[in-house]
Amino acid sequence: MSERAAPFYCPYCGDEDLRPSEQGHGAWECAACNRAFQLKFLGLLARGVQRTEGGGDEI
């Protein structure tokens, strides 16, 4: 079994002082802004990422 993925920064304040939360799988706490958040993997896209003619990614 692989390790769970960890976020690199808080989605609210951008700080890197994150700790796993006791609230359950995927829950994290930010010590800088005192917020808690949860990450959840939804699944893979059936069509994947497609390139546009401009060179950028289209989702």
Image (tube, grey):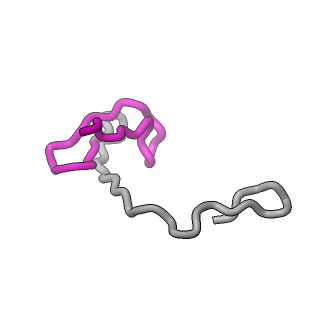
Which residue is more in the foreground, 36 or 24?
Answer: 24
Residue 30 at what x, y percent from top left? Answer: 32, 39
Query: Quick check: is 26 in the magenta stretch?
Result: yes
Residue at the top extreme of this rendering: 17
Residue 31 at what x, y percent from top left? Answer: 30, 34
Say above or below: 28 vs 45: above
Residue in the image at 45% along x and 42% along y: 13
Which residue is more in the foreground, 33 or 28?
Answer: 28
Q: Which residues are magenta?
A: 1-28
Query: Quick check: is 35 in the magenta stretch?
Result: no
Q: Quadrant of residue 21?
A: top left
Residue at the right extreme of this rendering: 54
Q: Quadrant of the C terminus?
A: bottom right
Q: Quadrant of residue 7?
A: top left
**How many labels sit on residues?**
0
Predominant secondary structure in magenta? loop
> Left or right of 2: which side holds 46?
right
Residue in the image at 44% along x and 48% along y: 12
Say above or below: 32 vs 53: above
Which residue is more in the foreground, 31 or 22?
Answer: 22
